[in-house]
Image (tube, rainbow, N blue to C red):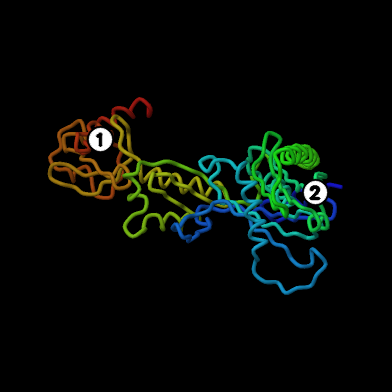
Amino acid sequence: KITSEAGILPRTHGSALFTRGETQCLAVVTLGTVEDEQRIDSLEGEFKKAFMLHYNFPSFSVGEVRPMRGPGRREIGHGILAERALKAILPLRSDFPYTIRIVADILESNGSSSMATVCGGTLALMDAGVPIRSAVAGIAMGLIKEGDRTVILTDILGLEDHLGDMDFKVTGTKEGITAFQMDVKISGVSKEIMGKALERARLGRLHILDKMSEELSAPRDTLATYAPRIFTMQIKPDKIRDVIGPGGKVIRGIVEETGVKINVDDDGNINIASADEASAQKAMDIIKGIVAEAELGKLYMGKIKRIMDFGAFVEILPGTEGLLHISQIAEERIAKVTDVLKEGQEILVKVIEIDKTGRIRLSRKEAIKEQAPVKS
Protein backbone atom coordinates (compact mmCIF):
# COMPACT_ATOMS: atom_id res chain seq x y z
CA LYS A 1 0.00 0.00 0.00
CA ILE A 2 1.27 3.47 -0.92
CA THR A 3 0.07 6.62 0.86
CA SER A 4 1.23 10.22 0.64
CA GLU A 5 0.44 13.28 2.73
CA ALA A 6 1.80 16.72 1.84
CA GLY A 7 1.91 19.69 4.22
CA ILE A 8 1.83 17.48 7.29
CA LEU A 9 3.85 19.91 9.44
CA PRO A 10 2.26 23.37 9.86
CA ARG A 11 5.26 25.68 10.39
CA THR A 12 7.79 24.33 7.88
CA HIS A 13 8.37 25.67 4.38
CA GLY A 14 7.40 22.29 2.92
CA SER A 15 6.79 18.80 4.30
CA ALA A 16 5.50 15.39 3.30
CA LEU A 17 4.98 11.94 4.76
CA PHE A 18 5.46 9.10 2.27
CA THR A 19 4.62 5.52 3.19
CA ARG A 20 5.23 2.45 1.04
CA GLY A 21 4.35 -0.77 2.80
CA GLU A 22 6.43 -0.92 6.00
CA THR A 23 8.76 1.90 4.96
CA GLN A 24 7.97 5.48 5.90
CA CYS A 25 9.81 8.76 5.32
CA LEU A 26 9.14 12.22 6.73
CA ALA A 27 10.72 14.83 4.43
CA VAL A 28 11.02 18.52 5.32
CA VAL A 29 12.12 21.30 2.96
CA THR A 30 13.69 24.55 4.15
CA LEU A 31 14.38 27.45 1.78
CA GLY A 32 17.19 29.91 2.41
CA THR A 33 19.26 32.61 0.78
CA VAL A 34 22.66 32.58 -0.90
CA GLU A 35 24.24 33.07 2.53
CA ASP A 36 22.86 29.66 3.58
CA GLU A 37 24.73 27.70 0.91
CA GLN A 38 26.87 24.85 2.23
CA ARG A 39 30.59 25.53 1.95
CA ILE A 40 32.62 22.41 1.27
CA ASP A 41 36.41 22.22 1.42
CA SER A 42 37.37 19.27 -0.78
CA LEU A 43 40.65 17.96 -2.17
CA GLU A 44 39.92 19.90 -5.35
CA GLY A 45 39.32 23.17 -3.50
CA GLU A 46 36.43 24.93 -1.86
CA PHE A 47 32.99 25.02 -3.46
CA LYS A 48 29.40 25.75 -2.46
CA LYS A 49 26.19 23.74 -2.66
CA ALA A 50 22.81 25.38 -3.09
CA PHE A 51 20.94 22.07 -2.78
CA MET A 52 21.41 19.66 0.11
CA LEU A 53 19.66 16.48 1.15
CA HIS A 54 20.39 15.03 4.57
CA TYR A 55 19.18 11.51 5.24
CA ASN A 56 18.72 10.22 8.79
CA PHE A 57 18.17 6.58 9.70
CA PRO A 58 17.43 6.37 13.45
CA SER A 59 17.64 2.97 15.11
CA PHE A 60 13.96 2.98 16.14
CA SER A 61 12.97 2.74 12.45
CA VAL A 62 14.01 -0.93 12.52
CA GLY A 63 12.95 -1.62 16.11
CA GLU A 64 16.40 -1.26 17.65
CA VAL A 65 17.77 0.84 20.50
CA ARG A 66 21.14 2.41 19.76
CA PRO A 67 22.73 5.70 20.79
CA MET A 68 22.22 8.57 18.35
CA ARG A 69 25.54 9.32 16.68
CA GLY A 70 26.67 11.22 13.60
CA PRO A 71 25.72 9.94 10.15
CA GLY A 72 27.50 6.78 9.04
CA ARG A 73 28.72 5.71 5.63
CA ARG A 74 25.36 4.18 4.75
CA GLU A 75 23.39 7.32 5.63
CA ILE A 76 25.77 9.55 3.68
CA GLY A 77 25.60 7.26 0.65
CA HIS A 78 21.81 7.06 0.68
CA GLY A 79 21.61 10.83 1.03
CA ILE A 80 23.91 11.39 -1.96
CA LEU A 81 21.84 9.02 -4.12
CA ALA A 82 18.56 10.75 -3.22
CA GLU A 83 20.16 14.17 -3.69
CA ARG A 84 21.36 13.22 -7.16
CA ALA A 85 17.90 11.91 -8.05
CA LEU A 86 16.19 15.18 -7.12
CA LYS A 87 18.85 17.59 -8.35
CA ALA A 88 17.97 16.78 -11.96
CA ILE A 89 14.49 18.29 -11.71
CA LEU A 90 15.27 21.46 -9.75
CA PRO A 91 14.71 24.85 -11.43
CA LEU A 92 17.64 26.86 -12.74
CA ARG A 93 19.43 29.00 -10.18
CA SER A 94 18.70 32.11 -12.24
CA ASP A 95 14.95 31.37 -12.08
CA PHE A 96 14.82 30.29 -8.43
CA PRO A 97 17.68 31.85 -6.41
CA TYR A 98 17.02 29.92 -3.21
CA THR A 99 19.20 27.56 -1.22
CA ILE A 100 17.22 24.33 -0.73
CA ARG A 101 17.71 21.84 2.08
CA ILE A 102 15.78 18.60 2.48
CA VAL A 103 15.96 16.62 5.71
CA ALA A 104 14.61 13.08 5.39
CA ASP A 105 13.91 11.13 8.58
CA ILE A 106 13.11 7.44 8.19
CA LEU A 107 10.38 6.54 10.67
CA GLU A 108 10.12 2.85 9.76
CA SER A 109 12.01 0.68 7.34
CA ASN A 110 11.48 -2.67 5.69
CA GLY A 111 12.49 -1.92 2.14
CA SER A 112 14.34 0.79 0.30
CA SER A 113 14.30 3.85 2.53
CA SER A 114 16.42 5.86 0.08
CA MET A 115 13.74 5.45 -2.60
CA ALA A 116 11.08 6.50 -0.09
CA THR A 117 13.26 9.56 0.56
CA VAL A 118 13.15 10.47 -3.13
CA CYS A 119 9.35 10.22 -3.17
CA GLY A 120 8.92 12.13 0.07
CA GLY A 121 11.45 14.75 -1.02
CA THR A 122 9.56 15.35 -4.27
CA LEU A 123 6.27 15.90 -2.44
CA ALA A 124 7.92 18.21 0.11
CA LEU A 125 9.47 20.31 -2.67
CA MET A 126 6.10 20.68 -4.36
CA ASP A 127 4.47 21.51 -1.02
CA ALA A 128 7.02 24.32 -0.54
CA GLY A 129 6.15 25.77 -3.93
CA VAL A 130 9.50 24.97 -5.54
CA PRO A 131 8.85 24.96 -9.31
CA ILE A 132 10.37 21.56 -10.05
CA ARG A 133 10.24 20.39 -13.66
CA SER A 134 8.62 17.05 -12.91
CA ALA A 135 7.85 14.69 -10.04
CA VAL A 136 10.44 12.00 -9.26
CA ALA A 137 9.88 8.57 -7.73
CA GLY A 138 12.22 5.69 -6.98
CA ILE A 139 12.02 1.94 -6.64
CA ALA A 140 14.46 -0.83 -5.69
CA MET A 141 14.73 -3.93 -7.88
CA GLY A 142 16.11 -7.27 -6.72
CA LEU A 143 17.43 -10.47 -8.30
CA ILE A 144 17.67 -14.10 -7.30
CA LYS A 145 19.90 -16.16 -9.57
CA GLU A 146 20.61 -19.89 -9.41
CA GLY A 147 22.53 -21.17 -12.41
CA ASP A 148 20.60 -20.13 -15.51
CA ARG A 149 17.42 -19.49 -13.57
CA THR A 150 16.74 -15.88 -12.63
CA VAL A 151 13.89 -14.09 -10.91
CA ILE A 152 13.63 -10.30 -10.90
CA LEU A 153 11.93 -8.80 -7.85
CA THR A 154 10.17 -5.43 -7.73
CA ASP A 155 10.21 -3.22 -4.61
CA ILE A 156 12.30 -5.56 -2.50
CA LEU A 157 11.89 -5.91 1.26
CA GLY A 158 14.73 -6.05 3.76
CA LEU A 159 14.87 -9.86 3.74
CA GLU A 160 14.87 -9.99 -0.07
CA ASP A 161 17.71 -7.48 -0.11
CA HIS A 162 19.68 -9.55 2.41
CA LEU A 163 19.18 -12.92 0.69
CA GLY A 164 19.05 -11.72 -2.92
CA ASP A 165 21.87 -11.21 -5.41
CA MET A 166 21.16 -7.63 -6.50
CA ASP A 167 19.94 -4.32 -5.12
CA PHE A 168 19.23 -2.05 -8.09
CA LYS A 169 17.79 1.34 -7.16
CA VAL A 170 16.28 3.39 -10.01
CA THR A 171 14.81 6.89 -9.76
CA GLY A 172 13.19 8.99 -12.44
CA THR A 173 10.24 10.88 -13.84
CA LYS A 174 7.61 9.71 -16.33
CA GLU A 175 10.02 10.72 -19.09
CA GLY A 176 13.25 9.11 -17.93
CA ILE A 177 15.81 8.16 -15.29
CA THR A 178 17.49 10.72 -13.03
CA ALA A 179 19.74 8.39 -11.01
CA PHE A 180 20.45 4.74 -10.29
CA GLN A 181 22.72 2.60 -8.16
CA MET A 182 23.43 -1.10 -8.31
CA ASP A 183 24.91 -3.42 -5.69
CA VAL A 184 25.51 -7.02 -6.76
CA LYS A 185 26.73 -10.10 -4.93
CA ILE A 186 27.36 -12.15 -8.07
CA SER A 187 30.06 -11.85 -10.71
CA GLY A 188 27.94 -9.78 -13.08
CA VAL A 189 24.54 -9.02 -14.60
CA SER A 190 23.74 -9.64 -18.27
CA LYS A 191 22.28 -7.02 -20.60
CA GLU A 192 19.09 -9.06 -20.78
CA ILE A 193 18.61 -9.03 -16.99
CA MET A 194 19.50 -5.35 -16.88
CA GLY A 195 16.93 -4.54 -19.56
CA LYS A 196 14.17 -6.47 -17.81
CA ALA A 197 14.99 -4.85 -14.48
CA LEU A 198 14.89 -1.37 -16.00
CA GLU A 199 11.57 -2.02 -17.72
CA ARG A 200 9.96 -3.36 -14.55
CA ALA A 201 11.43 -0.44 -12.60
CA ARG A 202 9.80 1.92 -15.10
CA LEU A 203 6.39 0.31 -14.59
CA GLY A 204 6.78 0.42 -10.82
CA ARG A 205 7.96 4.02 -10.94
CA LEU A 206 4.96 5.09 -13.01
CA HIS A 207 2.61 3.38 -10.55
CA ILE A 208 4.21 5.23 -7.61
CA LEU A 209 4.07 8.56 -9.47
CA ASP A 210 0.35 8.05 -10.10
CA LYS A 211 -0.20 7.41 -6.39
CA MET A 212 1.82 10.52 -5.48
CA SER A 213 -0.14 12.68 -7.92
CA GLU A 214 -3.35 11.79 -6.10
CA GLU A 215 -2.02 13.83 -3.17
CA LEU A 216 -0.15 16.57 -5.06
CA SER A 217 0.16 16.60 -8.84
CA ALA A 218 2.12 19.85 -9.28
CA PRO A 219 4.03 22.42 -7.21
CA ARG A 220 1.83 24.79 -5.24
CA ASP A 221 1.08 28.07 -7.03
CA THR A 222 2.70 30.23 -4.36
CA LEU A 223 5.79 29.91 -2.23
CA ALA A 224 5.40 28.69 1.35
CA THR A 225 4.00 31.33 3.69
CA TYR A 226 6.98 31.25 6.05
CA ALA A 227 9.68 31.09 3.37
CA PRO A 228 11.80 34.20 2.72
CA ARG A 229 10.97 36.22 -0.38
CA ILE A 230 13.91 36.78 -2.71
CA PHE A 231 13.87 39.57 -5.27
CA THR A 232 16.55 40.03 -7.90
CA MET A 233 17.83 43.08 -9.71
CA GLN A 234 20.72 43.82 -12.04
CA ILE A 235 23.13 46.75 -11.83
CA LYS A 236 26.22 47.69 -13.81
CA PRO A 237 29.38 46.05 -12.39
CA ASP A 238 31.06 49.45 -12.04
CA LYS A 239 28.24 50.51 -9.70
CA ILE A 240 28.85 47.67 -7.23
CA ARG A 241 31.29 49.74 -5.17
CA ASP A 242 28.66 52.49 -4.83
CA VAL A 243 26.12 50.02 -3.43
CA ILE A 244 28.61 48.43 -1.02
CA GLY A 245 30.31 51.68 0.00
CA PRO A 246 33.63 52.14 1.84
CA GLY A 247 34.09 49.18 4.16
CA GLY A 248 30.53 48.04 3.44
CA LYS A 249 29.05 51.15 5.05
CA VAL A 250 26.34 51.76 2.45
CA ILE A 251 25.05 48.19 2.19
CA ARG A 252 25.05 47.80 5.98
CA GLY A 253 22.99 50.95 6.25
CA ILE A 254 20.42 49.57 3.79
CA VAL A 255 20.22 46.30 5.75
CA GLU A 256 19.76 48.11 9.07
CA GLU A 257 17.11 50.43 7.65
CA THR A 258 15.03 47.78 5.88
CA GLY A 259 15.82 44.53 7.75
CA VAL A 260 16.54 42.61 4.55
CA LYS A 261 19.46 40.40 3.51
CA ILE A 262 21.42 41.55 0.46
CA ASN A 263 23.88 39.59 -1.65
CA VAL A 264 25.82 41.18 -4.52
CA ASP A 265 27.89 39.10 -6.95
CA ASP A 266 30.72 40.22 -9.24
CA ASP A 267 28.42 40.43 -12.29
CA GLY A 268 26.12 42.98 -10.68
CA ASN A 269 23.34 40.53 -9.79
CA ILE A 270 21.70 41.52 -6.50
CA ASN A 271 19.53 39.17 -4.44
CA ILE A 272 17.37 40.78 -1.77
CA ALA A 273 15.76 38.44 0.76
CA SER A 274 13.01 39.58 3.07
CA ALA A 275 10.12 38.21 5.08
CA ASP A 276 7.80 40.76 3.47
CA GLU A 277 7.60 42.40 0.06
CA ALA A 278 7.39 45.98 1.36
CA SER A 279 10.83 45.85 3.00
CA ALA A 280 12.37 44.30 -0.10
CA GLN A 281 10.81 46.96 -2.32
CA LYS A 282 12.16 49.70 -0.05
CA ALA A 283 15.67 48.24 -0.30
CA MET A 284 15.36 47.98 -4.08
CA ASP A 285 14.25 51.62 -4.32
CA ILE A 286 17.25 52.72 -2.25
CA ILE A 287 19.64 50.75 -4.47
CA LYS A 288 18.01 52.10 -7.63
CA GLY A 289 18.56 55.59 -6.29
CA ILE A 290 22.23 54.86 -5.60
CA VAL A 291 22.98 53.42 -9.04
CA ALA A 292 20.74 55.75 -11.02
CA GLU A 293 22.45 57.87 -13.68
CA ALA A 294 21.48 61.34 -14.81
CA GLU A 295 19.45 61.42 -18.03
CA LEU A 296 19.63 64.24 -20.53
CA GLY A 297 16.45 66.33 -20.59
CA LYS A 298 15.05 64.87 -17.37
CA LEU A 299 13.80 66.91 -14.41
CA TYR A 300 15.22 66.27 -10.92
CA MET A 301 14.50 67.64 -7.48
CA GLY A 302 18.02 68.40 -6.32
CA LYS A 303 19.70 69.71 -3.19
CA ILE A 304 22.21 72.56 -3.30
CA LYS A 305 25.52 71.33 -1.92
CA ARG A 306 27.88 74.25 -2.59
CA ILE A 307 27.46 77.82 -3.80
CA MET A 308 30.19 79.46 -5.89
CA ASP A 309 30.50 82.93 -7.48
CA PHE A 310 29.66 81.44 -10.90
CA GLY A 311 26.77 79.20 -9.81
CA ALA A 312 25.92 76.27 -7.56
CA PHE A 313 26.57 72.54 -7.40
CA VAL A 314 23.34 70.59 -7.03
CA GLU A 315 23.06 66.92 -6.01
CA ILE A 316 20.37 65.41 -8.23
CA LEU A 317 21.04 61.76 -7.32
CA PRO A 318 22.96 60.16 -4.42
CA GLY A 319 26.61 60.92 -5.16
CA THR A 320 25.80 62.68 -8.46
CA GLU A 321 26.19 66.45 -8.72
CA GLY A 322 25.74 68.90 -11.57
CA LEU A 323 26.66 72.53 -12.13
CA LEU A 324 23.88 75.08 -12.13
CA HIS A 325 25.47 78.13 -13.77
CA ILE A 326 24.37 81.58 -12.61
CA SER A 327 22.94 82.24 -16.07
CA GLN A 328 20.64 79.21 -15.75
CA ILE A 329 19.13 80.11 -12.37
CA ALA A 330 16.40 82.46 -13.59
CA GLU A 331 15.19 84.32 -16.66
CA GLU A 332 16.19 87.69 -15.24
CA ARG A 333 19.82 88.68 -14.68
CA ILE A 334 21.17 87.79 -11.23
CA ALA A 335 24.04 89.69 -9.61
CA LYS A 336 24.79 87.18 -6.85
CA VAL A 337 23.84 83.52 -6.56
CA THR A 338 23.10 83.93 -2.86
CA ASP A 339 20.36 86.45 -3.69
CA VAL A 340 18.24 83.53 -4.94
CA LEU A 341 19.74 80.29 -3.60
CA LYS A 342 21.23 79.00 -0.38
CA GLU A 343 23.01 75.79 0.64
CA GLY A 344 20.69 72.92 1.59
CA GLN A 345 17.81 74.33 -0.44
CA GLU A 346 15.89 71.90 -2.66
CA ILE A 347 15.18 73.11 -6.18
CA LEU A 348 13.83 71.67 -9.41
CA VAL A 349 16.43 71.48 -12.19
CA LYS A 350 16.72 70.05 -15.68
CA VAL A 351 19.74 68.24 -17.15
CA ILE A 352 20.68 70.23 -20.25
CA GLU A 353 24.11 68.74 -20.98
CA ILE A 354 26.30 65.74 -20.13
CA ASP A 355 29.78 66.00 -21.64
CA LYS A 356 32.15 63.17 -22.58
CA THR A 357 33.75 63.15 -19.14
CA GLY A 358 30.35 62.79 -17.44
CA ARG A 359 30.13 66.36 -16.16
CA ILE A 360 26.54 67.54 -15.86
CA ARG A 361 25.12 70.98 -16.57
CA LEU A 362 21.78 71.92 -15.05
CA SER A 363 19.18 74.61 -15.65
CA ARG A 364 16.63 75.90 -13.17
CA LYS A 365 14.95 78.29 -15.58
CA GLU A 366 14.37 75.49 -18.14
CA ALA A 367 12.83 73.33 -15.42
CA ILE A 368 10.52 76.19 -14.39
CA LYS A 369 9.45 76.68 -18.01
CA GLU A 370 8.68 72.98 -18.39
CA GLN A 371 6.69 72.87 -15.17
CA ALA A 372 4.74 76.08 -15.83
CA PRO A 373 2.02 74.51 -18.05
CA VAL A 374 1.51 71.73 -15.51
CA LYS A 375 0.99 74.18 -12.65
CA SER A 376 -1.51 76.26 -14.63
In the orientation shown, which residue stands out farthest toward the right? 1
Q: CA distance from mark 1 to mark 2?
A: 92 Å
Disc number for residue 188: none
- Where's residue 267, x and y in %? 39, 44
Circle 2 residues within 10 Å: few <14, some 14–19, many ≥20: some
For the residue marked with disc 1, what is the amino acid? Arg
Choose between 69 and 317: the one closer to the eye. 69
- Where's residue 263, x and y in %? 45, 52
Choose between 116 and 258: the one closer to the eye. 116
- Which quarter of the picture shows residue 348? top left
Judged by depth in the image, the label closer to the viewer, 1 or 2, is: 2
Q: Residue at x 18, y 32 (%)?
A: 332
- Which quarter of the picture shows residue 30? bottom right
Circle 1 residues within 10 Å: few <14, some 14–19, many ≥20: many
Choose between 177 and 163: the one closer to the eye. 163
- Where's residue 265, x and y in %? 41, 49
Q: Residue at x 79, y 72 (%)?
A: 65
- Where's residue 214, x and y in %? 80, 39
- In the picture of the structure, the residue carrying the numbered disc 2 is 145
Secondary structure beneath label 1:
helix
Height in image: 336 above or below 61? Answer: above
For the residue marked with disc 2, what is the amino acid? Lys
- In the picture of the structure, the residue carrying the numbered disc 1 is 364
In the orientation shown, which residue stands out farthest toward the front? 147
Height in image: 311 above or below 71? Answer: above
Q: Quadrant of the C terminus?
A: top left
Q: Earlier in the sequence, mark 1 or mark 2?
A: 2
Secondary structure beneath label 2:
strand
